[in-house]
Image (spheres, rainbow, N blue to C red):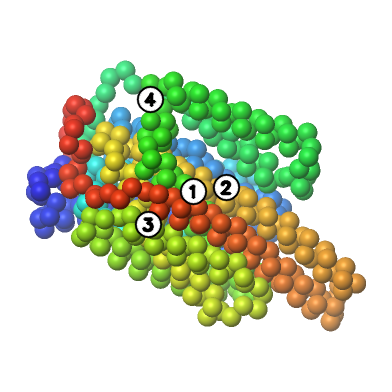
Amino acid sequence: MSTAVNGAGPTETSPAARRKVLKALSGLLLALFVSTLSSTVVSSALPKIIGAVHGSQTQYTWVVTATLLTTTATTPIWGKLADLFSKKTLVQASIAVFVLGAVASGISQTAGQLIASRALQGVGVGGVQALVQISLAAMIPPRERGRYSGYLSSVTATSTIGGPLLGGVIVDTSWLGWRWCFFIGVPIAVVSLFLLQRTLNLPVIRRENVRIDYLGATLIAAGVSVLLVWVSFVDNSFGWASWQTAAMVGGGLALIAVAVWVESRAAEPVVPLGIVRQRTTALAIVGSLAVGTAMFGAAVFLSQYFQLSRGHSPTEAGLLTIPMMAGILIASTVAGRLISRTGKIKPFIITGAVLLTVGFTGLGTLDSRTPILLLSVEMLCVGMGVGMTLQNLVLVVQNTVPLKDIGAASSTVSFFRSLGGTIGVSVLGAVLARHVQDQISHGLADAGLRSTATGSDAVTVREIVRAAYGDATAQIFLLSAGAALLAVIAAILLKPVSLRSSLDLTEKSGEAAVPAEAG
């Protein structure tokens, strides 16, 4: 096999080529780690952060959701830009936006400022997460990419699940404080910028008279945003059968319908419907929605469960999620190597989706007294499921498209994975809040107590609250199990494929690759 790697001539299997890839990958992995970490590092710290900025329960969820929403909305734009312009310049620009958002979040004084800053940070996160995968796809053919995708999956999932642990340590350290949950990523991001400047050198495809479909991207973002805002407020600020519900649901669906119409007619759509309609891509999208829901939902709500239902500190809550991290690391590394060795990917995606479903089904039975050992086994299953599906759903789509469409195809799958995470956190958070409120109200009424009780009654109130959070968390994990089951069905329906050993498809697109300028 004679595949150019990172603009070099050695074959991918040669030691020289592998060293070149790993050097370029070091900066990409650092950027990916810190960007993904930003989505969940606040999870353990959120109770203290919201208290410090005098936020509400709804704002609690939106500190996480704002980042996921803008990540989702901007991912396809970054991906389309990557098919047209320098991938190296774009990934550096996305890191710079991320740094600005992190600094702004760290100096926020109110909940509104924090949510806005987190939204800006999400724009950078969307670029980094899409462009890292796109850059890897531009360097390595799919067959060999399995090995390196294991690294990406390990970094993404470890930073996602490990975020609550780091956040807990930060807020429990008196001389740091919650603001360092945002500042901590800045020096790492800056280091990744310098590494990328020195090591990353990719070909640039130049095309004339190209237009970015900003209208389609705006309509998609607006439609999704309206529906998520509705989910956050329905049954609290207004009812399900109300004019507000009709206006927001109808308006959101109308915006999405117009976006589909615009995308079908755009010369350069941000979400290419031709790619989406392909069986492999469509099924990978369904799987990615489920995995996104699982990964972000588990990271955010398990940490909250350990603190509010089990009475652990933020640091302890993070430590208790280590089995999930271990599952991700082991499964992604082993699966990545086996995929590169065999060229087969479908069996690993099916196995991962099944493990995800089994793990969440088990977590759906937890309460405030579930043995930690049993929870650890269930979290291990969830972690292994995420590790075997996360990057492989992107890889199976990358295998079906030519190199010139890698950016759009990769970002489309990433878009729906982020969308799954955004919907998951919003919907599951809303369900959790309502279940907790109902359970506490009924528990206090049955005990003839008020939430402001003191003395021995206060202990009873505390137990009612813990039981409420335990039962409510079980309910949302049962919903996650249902989403994971969709991933199983999608994985089974995937066509068995052998990953290609060439960087591009046999039929060339005719696009000329112009070597990127060094440096």
Instruction: Give yes or no for contact between labels 2 and 1 (Cβ–Cβ under 8 Å).
Output: yes
**Kind of residue at disc 3:** Ile
- Which of discs 1 and 3 lies nearer the camera? The answer is 3
Of circles 2 and 1, which is in front? 1
Tell me: 377 left or right of 456.
left
- For disc 3, the neighbor class at 10 Å (few under 14, some 14 to 19, many from 20) is many
Q: Which mark is residue 289?
A: 1
Marks 1 and 3 close (CB-CB < 8 Å): no
Regarding residue 283, the answer to whether it shows in the image is yes
Q: Earlier in the sequence, mark 4 or mark 2?
A: 4
3D distance between C-alphas at marks 2 and 1: 9 Å
The reply to whether discs 4 and 2 touch (Cβ–Cβ < 8 Å) is no
Please state which amino acid type lies under the numbered disc 2.
Answer: Ile
Residue under label 2:
423
Query: Considering only vertical position in the picture, is 332 above or below 286?
Result: below
Q: Residue at x 47, y 65 (%)?
A: 382
Callout 4, which amino acid? Glu
Quadrant showing the C terminus: top left
